[in-house]
Amino acid sequence: MVDGADAGLEGRDLDVGYRGIPVVHAASIHLRSGVVTALVGPNGSGKSTLLRALVRLHRPTGGDVVFGDGTPARALTSKQFARQVTLLAQSRPTPSGVLVRDVVGYGRHPYRSRWRADDQGGPGAIAHAMEVTGITGMADRPVDELSGGERQRVWLASCLAQDTGVLLLDEPTTFLDLRYQVEMLDLIRDLADEHAVAVGVVLHDLDHAAQVADEVVLLQDGRVRAAGDPAEVLTEPHLTETYGIRIEVSRDPGTGAITTRPVGRHTHRLRELTR
Ligand SMILES: Nc1ncnc2c1ncn2[C@@H]1O[C@H](COP(=O)(O)OP(=O)(O)OP(=O)(O)O)[C@@H](O)[C@H]1O
């Protein structure tokens, strides 16, 4: 597969490590077009490492990454791959003095050729990405002068401008205020529902995962502890065992919405105080 084929992406039995030390063990994940898959799990459970292996930033020591039509990811050049898959990383370097519009324009990099400065709808894609992330008014500001949340939206816009069929987001709600957290979740759903994007998103907020995802992958110590329907994965036994604290899970009988509540030693007392 090169351009235009089924953009879903699958990691099969991936083993990934750092300097010979295994971190992710035989992890499988299937990102399908039009489906939002949330990756959840404690700190250090391997979520970012798994995403990095999927985008070829990290070479797995075992297993394989393949596209929806069976093409191995390694068969593509880096430019071809970047037209299919993009990652909003957890942290990104902030270049000094570079304008927001240029950072977003960097997302068009995989489409540039020596002959045309910006082909395949580049300027339109840049403007659209800035519009949906609410940063159009900041286009001419240097990115290093923005707040953490504003920067997060600029990096997201850069990913959206890349216009890929597979979008991986590593904790995209970090730094965002409540409004933009909600807008981020809405945007993720729109990308899947209206543009058939295969979205893989790391979220620490389990309620957000339950709200936005069609499927949830729960990682524990680098292994997939459970995967599938959110209601089957986000259960009290799974979460309590994985996170090592009691986590109550309730389900609204009408809407089916899942709500989780971690229970600390003082949770009860705090509830009394705020009543
Ligand atoms: N560059 C690195 N070199 C060595 N070990 C690393 C490196 N990056 C991550 N690790 C280790 O790999 C394991 C998995 O880390 P990873 O960042 O994938 O976890 P995570 O689930 O994304 O965590 P978090 O929720 O804290 O972001 C951790 O034990 C971490 O210490």
Image (cartoon, rainbow, N blue to C red):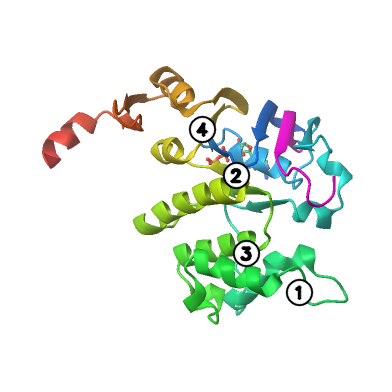
Q: Amino acid at mark 3?
A: Ser
Which residue is label 1 attached to?
118
User: Residue 109: x and y, percent?
Assistant: 75, 66
First-in-chain label (3 vs 4)? 4
Foreground mark, 3 or 2, reads 2
* First to last magenta residue range: 1-19
Foreground mark, 3 or 4, reads 3
User: Residue 138: x and y, percent?
Assistant: 50, 77
Q: Pointer 2: residues within 10 angstroms few (<14), some, or many (20+)?
A: many
Viewed as shown, does residue 55 lie left or right of 35?
Answer: right
First-in-chain label (1 vs 2)? 1
Q: Pointer 4: residues within 10 angstroms few (<14), some, or many (20+)?
A: many
Marks 3 and 4, how far apart at CA: 27 Å
Dot 3: what SS?
Answer: helix
Foreground mark, 4 or 2, reads 2
Q: Split into 4 quadrants, where in the image is the C terminus? A: top left
Q: Split into 4 quadrants, where in the image is the N terminus? A: top right
Q: Establish if 108 lies above or below 192.
A: below
Which residue is label 2 attached to?
199
Label 1 lies in ligand 1 vicinity (Cβ under 8 Å): no
Which residue is label 3 attached to?
158
Marks 4 and 2, how far apart at CA: 17 Å
- The reply to whether the C-beta atoms of the residues labelled 1 and 2 are less than 8 Å apart is no
Image mark for residue 41: 4
Marks 1 and 2, how far apart at CA: 26 Å
Q: Amino acid at mark 2?
A: Val
Q: Ligand 1 falls in which quarter?
A: top right
Instruction: Determine if residue 104 is in view.
Output: no
Q: Quadrant of residue 235?
A: top left
Q: Pointer 3: residues within 10 angstroms few (<14), some, or many (20+)?
A: many
User: Residue 231: x and y, percent?
Assistant: 44, 25
Q: Quadrant of residue 248?
A: top left
